[in-house]
C-alpha cells in the first residue's frame, strides 16, 4: 500500500515521488542504467536512429497538414502547395526525404556494427530479432511513404512491388487486386498506403522500438571486446567513487554526453544534405506526375532496397521470388546460423572476419547492380553477387562451427 | 586513435556507396550529350540526318549562312513583316494544331541564324522535317518559304525583328513566347491560352460558367495540339527538378539529340533567351532555392556550434574516466 | 550527480533551447494561412445591379455579405446615427454588411415586410441599416473593408469612407 504524506507540497519532489516514483525512474532509466565504458562512437547509432525517427515524425506532421491523398491532387499538394506556398514547407519536405534515406544508412551501420561485434548472441538474440523486425517495419514505412507524392516512380514502384504478390506461377492476380483495392494502383491504393504510412506503421514502429529497448535491458549493451563482465560489481565500483577503474558508465549524463556529440556531427551532415545535396533522396523521376500509360526508361527503388531488388532480378520469375523472400528473412536467423559461442569483434574470429567483409562487399555490389540497367556485364555481375549472397549464408554455419573457442 | 580509424572506414564505405548508386549509375543510364553552345549552323542536324537527307540539309544551312552575310534593312523589313503579323498576333487562331506564338521579343530571345532558317523553311530550321514525309510545305508555317523567299527580304525581316521586336524581356515573357503555346505551366498559372481570367461564380448555384468556358477553350486547344503533335506536350511546372540543367539545355537546343524522333521543334533560343527561359523554369520548378540559400548557413552554423559545445560537455563528463 | 555545477551541460542545454525556439518559429510559419488563401480575400460587387429594398447575398472570404439598397422610404426612416452605417455611391445608399449575427455567428433572416433582420438562434433583431434594435447582439452587423471604384465595391480593399467608419466606431475591423 503506497504511503502518501499529507504535508507534502503538491508537485514537489516528494509528492511526485509518492505518485510517479520519479527517483526510481531516474535511477533505472539514466543515472544507474549502466553502459560499458569500452565502446566507440558506433554505439551511439541507436540514439541517432531515435533522433532521426523523431525528426521524420515531426516533419511528417507538418507535411500531413497540407498533403492531399487524392490521385488528382496528391502530386501538386506536395510539389506546389507544400514546396511553394507553405511557410517552410520546402524545409519539411527536404528534411523528410533526406531523413528517410539517412535513417536507412544509419540502420545499416547499426546492423553491421551488431554483426561485427557479435551483439546478437548469448542473451542478445531478441535484441537482434526485434531490430530486424524494426528494419522490416521501417521498410514498409518507407515504401508506403514513397507512394504518396504520386509521381512516376511512386506509381510504377507500387505496380511492380504489388505484382510480386501474384507469386509468379501461382498467378494470384486476384490477391494482387485485393491488395491494391483496384486493378491497378489507383485511388484505393493511394488511400490505404496513406493510412499505413501515417498511422499503422508509425504505431507499430513505436511499439517495436519500445520492445527493442526492453530486450536490451537485461543482457545490457555489448562492448568492443565482447567481454562478459559483472555489471553489479562494476556498478558498485562506480558508485563507490572509483570511476576510473569501473568498467561501466551511467547512461546519463556520461554516455549521453558522447551520444549528443555524435548526434551533433551527424546533424551537420544531415542538414548539409538537406540544404545542398538532396537529389539522391528526391529522385528526379518522381517529379514527373504518375502516368499509368507510360513506364519511365529507368525505374529503380530507393538505394536502401537495391540489394534486395538485385537478388530478385537475375533469376527466372519463380526462382527470383523465392530468393527474394529468403533474402528478406535470412538476417533474422543470424543468431542461430552462427554456431560459434564466441562473442568477440570479427577481427578475432578467424574466418568469420572474412565472412563479414565478404558479406558487406557483396551487399554493396548487389546495391550497385540493382541500380544499373539489367544489361550485359551488369546483369552477369548481379547474378554472381546474388549467388555469392546465398553461398555466404550457407557457409556461415560451417565456418562458425569450426571456429576456435576464444 | 582507434575511433578515427573506425570513422574513416565507415565514411569510406558510405562514400563508395554514394558514388556507385548516384554518379556512376546515372552515368551508365544516361549517355552524355554535348550541346553546341547555342550555335545554329546545322552541324548537329547534318550529323544526325539519315543518308538521304544529309545533302539537302548541308545545302539548306549553307544558304542560311549566305543570307546571314547580307546586311538587313529594318525599315524595309517592317513592310515585309506585315505578312507575318497576320498570323502572329494577339488572339491568333489555332492553325493546323498550333497557335502561332507572339513575336514581341523575337529579336531578343531567338538566334539570328535560326530566325533566317525559320523563314526559309520552318520544318528544316526546327529539325522536325522528318515529321513531314509529304514535304515541309505542309508545316503550319510552311507557306512562309514561298511568301518571303528572296534572301534580302529574309535578311530585312530579321533585321526588323532584331531592332523593333527586341527590348527588355522578362523570364515569364520569354517562356510564354518560346514555349507557352504548347507547354502549360500550371504552377505559374499559365495555360496554353495564357492566364486564366478572373471570373465570378453564380452565388445561388456555385456554378462559374465563364470559368467553364475558358476551361473548354483550353481543352480544345490541348486536343488540337495532341492531334497535331502525337501527344500533349508536358506541363513544365516542375520540369526543372525532373531533369537536370544540362539535359534541359541540350534538349531545348536540339530536341532530336536527346529524344530522337520527337515532335518537339527546336526553339532557336539564343543565350539571353535560354537564360530567361531557364530562369522561369527555375521559378516555377524550384522556387525555394533562394530561401534554401539563406537558411542553409544559419542552420549549419547552429549545428557546428552545437557540436563544439557538445564536445566540450563530453570532455567534461569523461575527464576522469580513462 | 556531480556537486559542481555542470556549466557545459547548461550551456549546451541553453543553446539547444535556442535552436528549439527557431524550429518552433518555423513551425508557426507553416501553420500560417497560405498566400493563395489571403489573396483570394477580395471580391468585387457591382452596385448598379441591385434593386431597392431587395436583399442580395454575396460571398466574401467564405462569409455571406448582405447588400440592401435603401429605398427613399427606408432613407426617410434613418437617423444621423444609422445613416453612418450606409455606403453612398452615385447618390444611392447601400447597406453592405457581413451577414453573420454579432452575437454568436448565425445568419439572420431578412423580413421584407418589417424591413428588419431577425436572427433565429437567440432572437436578435436589426433594422434595415443592420443596426441592433433588440438584444442579445452586442452591436450592429459588421461592415467589411471596402474600396469604392466607380459603381463597384471591392470588398477586402480600403478607402477613406471605410477608414472613417472604423475611426468613429460605426464598425469593428472584420
Image: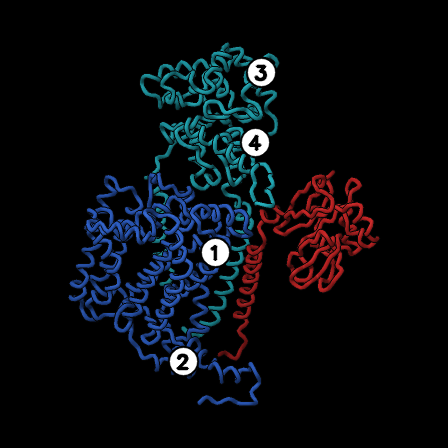
Whether the residues at callouts 2 and 4 have beta carbons within 8 Å, the answer is no
Q: CA distance from mark 3 to mark 1?
A: 56 Å
Q: Which residue is mark 4?
A: B173
In the picture, one chain is cyan; tell me its letter.
B
> Residue A64 got which mark?
1
Q: Which image quadrant is residue A223 in? A: bottom left
Looking at the rendered structure, the secondary structure element under dot 3 is: helix
User: Which color was chain A given?
Assistant: blue
> Residue A359 got which mark?
none
Compared to B267, does A306 lie above or below?
below
Q: CA distance from mark 2 to mark 4?
A: 74 Å
Whether the residues at callouts 2 and 1 have beta carbons within 8 Å, the answer is no
Q: Which residue is mark 3?
A: B82
Sequence-wise first label, 4 or 3:
3
**Do tags 2 and 1 sit on the same chain?**
yes
Residue found 33% across the figure and 76% down from its top: A218
Q: Chain of mark 3?
A: B
Q: Which image quadrant is residue A130 in? A: bottom left
Looking at the rendered structure, the secondary structure element under dot 4 is: helix
Position of residue A60 in the picture relative to residue A155 (left or right): right
User: Which color was chain C given?
Assistant: red
Whether the residues at callouts 4 and 3 have beta carbons within 8 Å, the answer is no
Q: CA distance from mark 4 to mark 3?
A: 22 Å
Q: Nearer the viewer, mark 2 or mark 1?
A: 1
Q: Nearer the viewer, mark 2 or mark 4?
A: 4
Residue A263 visible at all: yes
Whether the residues at callouts 2 and 3 have beta carbons within 8 Å, the answer is no
Amino acid at each position: 500500500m503506497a504511503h502518501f504524506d499529507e504535508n507534502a507540497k503538491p508537485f514537489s519532489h516528494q509528492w511526485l515521488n509518492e505518485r510517479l516514483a520519479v527517483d526510481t525512474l531516474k535511477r533505472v532509466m539514466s543515472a544507474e542504467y549502466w553502459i560499458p565504458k569500452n565502446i566507440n562512437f558506433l554505439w551511439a547509432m541507436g540514439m541517432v536512429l531515435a533522433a532521426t525517427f523523431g525528426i521524420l515524425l515531426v516533419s511528417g506532421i507538418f507535411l500531413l497538414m497540407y498533403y492531399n491523398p487524392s490521385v488528382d491532387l496528391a502530386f501538386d499538394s506536395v510539389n506546389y502547395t507544400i514546396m511553394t506556398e507553405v511557410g517552410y514547407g520546402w524545409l519539411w519536405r527536404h528534411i523528410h526525404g533526406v531523413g528517410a534515406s539517412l535513417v536507412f544508412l544509419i540502420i545499416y551501420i547499426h546492423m553491421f556494427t551488431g554483426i561485427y561485434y557479435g551483439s546478437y548472441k548469448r542473451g542478445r538474440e531478441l535484441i537482434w530479432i526485434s531490430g530486424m523486425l524494426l528494419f522490416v517495419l521501417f521498410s514498409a514505412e518507407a515504401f508506403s511513404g514513397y507512394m504518396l507524392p504520386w509521381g512516376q516512380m511512386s506509381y510504377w514502384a507500387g505496380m511492380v512491388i504489388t505484382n510480386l504478390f501474384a507469386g509468379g506461377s501461382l498467378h494470384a492476380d486476384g490477391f494482387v487486386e485485393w491488395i491494391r483495392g483496384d486493378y491497378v494502383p489507383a485511388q484505393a491504393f493511394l488511400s490505404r498506403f496513406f493510412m499505413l504510412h501515417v498511422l499503422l506503421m508509425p504505431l507499430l514502429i513505436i511499439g517495436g522500438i519500445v520492445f527493442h529497448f526492453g530486450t536490451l535491458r537485461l543482457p545490457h549493451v555489448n562492448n568492443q571486446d565482447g567481454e562478459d563482465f559483472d555489471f553489479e560489481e562494476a556498478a558498485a565500483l562506480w558508485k563507490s567513487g572509483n570511476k576510473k577503474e569501473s568498467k561501466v558508465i551511467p547512461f546519463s549524463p556520461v554516455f549521453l554526453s558522447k551520444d549528443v556529440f555524435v548526434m551533433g556531427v551527424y546533424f551537420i551532415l544531415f542538414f548539409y544534405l538537406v540544404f545542398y545535396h538532396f537529389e539522391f533522396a528526391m529522385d528526379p523521376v518522381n517529379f514527373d506526375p504518375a502516368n499509368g500509360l507510360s513506364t519511365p526508361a529507368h525505374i529503380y527503388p530507393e538505394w536502401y532496397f537495391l540489394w534486395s531488388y538485385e537478388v530478385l532480378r537475375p533469376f527466372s520469375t519463380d526462382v527470383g521470388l523465392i530468393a527474394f523472400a529468403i533474402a528478406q528473412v535470412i538476417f533474422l536467423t543470424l543468431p542461430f546460423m552462427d554456431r560459434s559461442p564466441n562473442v568477440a569483434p570479427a577481427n578475432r574470429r578467424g574466418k568469420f572476419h572474412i565472412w563479414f567483409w565478404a558479406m558487406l562487399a557483396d551487399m554493396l555490389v548487389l546495391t550497385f547492380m540493382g541500380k544499373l540497367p539489367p544489361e550485359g556485364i551488369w546483369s552477369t555481375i548481379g547474378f554472381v553477387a546474388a549467388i555469392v549472397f546465398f553461398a555466404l549464408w550457407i557457409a556461415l554455419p560451417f565456418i562458425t562451427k569450426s571456429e576456435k573457442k576464444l | 586513435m582507434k575511433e578515427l580509424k573506425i570513422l574513416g572506414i565507415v565514411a569510406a564505405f558510405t562514400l563508395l556507396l554514394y558514388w556507385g548508386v548516384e554518379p556512376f549509375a546515372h552515368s551508365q543510364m544516361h549517355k552524355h550529350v554535348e550541346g553546341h553552345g547555342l550555335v545554329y549552323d546545322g552541324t548537329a542536324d547534318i550529323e544526325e540526318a539519315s543518308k538521304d537527307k544529309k545533302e539537302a540539309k548541308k545545302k539548306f544551312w549553307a544558304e542560311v549562312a549566305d543570307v546571314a552575310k547580307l546586311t538587313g534593312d529594318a525599315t524595309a523589313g517592317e513592310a515585309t513583316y506585315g505578312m507575318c503579323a497576320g498570323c502572329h498576333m494577339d488572339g491568333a487562331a489555332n492553325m493546323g494544331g498550333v497557335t502561332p506564338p507572339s513575336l514581341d521579343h523575337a529579336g531578343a530571345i531567338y538566334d539570328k541564324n535560326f530566325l533566317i532558317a525559320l523563314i526559309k523553311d520552318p520544318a528544316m530550321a526546327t529539325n522536325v522535317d522528318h515529321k513531314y514525309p509529304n514535304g515541309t510545305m505542309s508545316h503550319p508555317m510552311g507557306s512562309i518559304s514561298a511568301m518571303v523567299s528572296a534572301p534580302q527580304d529574309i535578311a530585312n525581316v530579321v533585321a526588323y525583328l532584331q531592332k523593333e521586336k527586341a527590348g527588355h524581356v522578362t523570364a515569364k515573357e520569354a517562356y510564354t513566347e518560346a514555349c507557352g503555346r504548347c507547354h502549360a505551366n500550371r504552377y505559374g498559372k499559365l495555360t496554353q491560352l495564357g492566364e486564366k481570367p478572373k471570373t465570378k461564380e453564380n452565388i445561388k448555384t456555385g456554378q462559374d460558367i465563364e470559368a467553364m468556358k475558358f476551361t473548354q477553350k483550353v481543352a480544345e486547344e490541348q486536343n488540337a495540339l495532341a492531334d497535331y503533335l502525337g501527344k500533349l506536350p508536358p506541363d513544365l511546372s516542375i520540369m526543372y527538378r525532373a531533369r537536370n540543367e544540362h539535359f534541359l539545355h541540350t534538349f531545348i537546343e536540339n530536341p532530336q539529340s536527346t529524344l530522337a524522333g520527337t515532335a518537339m521543334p527546336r526553339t532557336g533560343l539564343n543565350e539571353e533567351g535560354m537564360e530567361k527561359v531557364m530562369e522561369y523554369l527555375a521559378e516555377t520548378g524550384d522556387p525555394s532555392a533562394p530561401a534554401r540559400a539563406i537558411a542553409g548557413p544559419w542552420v549549419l552554423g547552429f549545428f557546428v556550434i552545437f557540436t563544439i559545445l557538445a564536445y566540450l560537455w563530453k570532455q567534461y563528463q569523461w575527464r576522469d574516466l580513462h | 550527480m556531480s556537486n559542481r555545477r555542470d556549466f557545459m551541460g547548461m550551456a549546451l542545454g541553453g543553446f539547444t533551447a535556442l535552436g528549439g525556439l527557431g524550429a518552433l518559429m518555423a513551425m508557426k510559419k507553416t501553420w500560417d494561412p497560405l498566400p493563395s488563401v489571403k489573396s483570394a480575400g477580395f471580391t468585387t460587387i457591382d452596385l448598379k445591379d441591385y434593386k431597392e429594398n431587395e436583399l442580395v447575398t454575396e460571398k466574401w472570404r467564405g462569409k455571406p455579405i448582405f447588400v440592401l439598397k435603401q429605398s427613399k422610404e427606408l432613407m426617410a426612416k434613418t437617423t444621423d446615427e444609422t445613416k453612418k452605417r450606409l455606403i453612398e455611391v452615385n447618390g444611392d445608399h447601400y447597406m453592405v454588411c457581413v451577414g453573420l449575427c454579432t452575437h454568436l455567428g448565425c445568419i439572420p433572416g431578412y423580413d421584407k415586410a418589417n424591413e428588419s433582420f431577425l436572427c433565429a438562434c437567440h432572437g436578435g433583431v436589426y433594422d434595415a441599416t443592420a443596426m441592433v434594435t433588440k438584444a442579445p447582439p452586442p452591436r450592429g452587423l459588421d461592415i467589411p473593408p471596402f474600396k469604392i471604384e466607380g459603381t463597384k465595391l471591392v470588398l477586402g480593399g480600403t478607402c477613406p469612407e471605410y477608414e472613417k467608419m472604423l475611426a468613429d466606431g460605426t464598425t469593428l475591423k472584420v
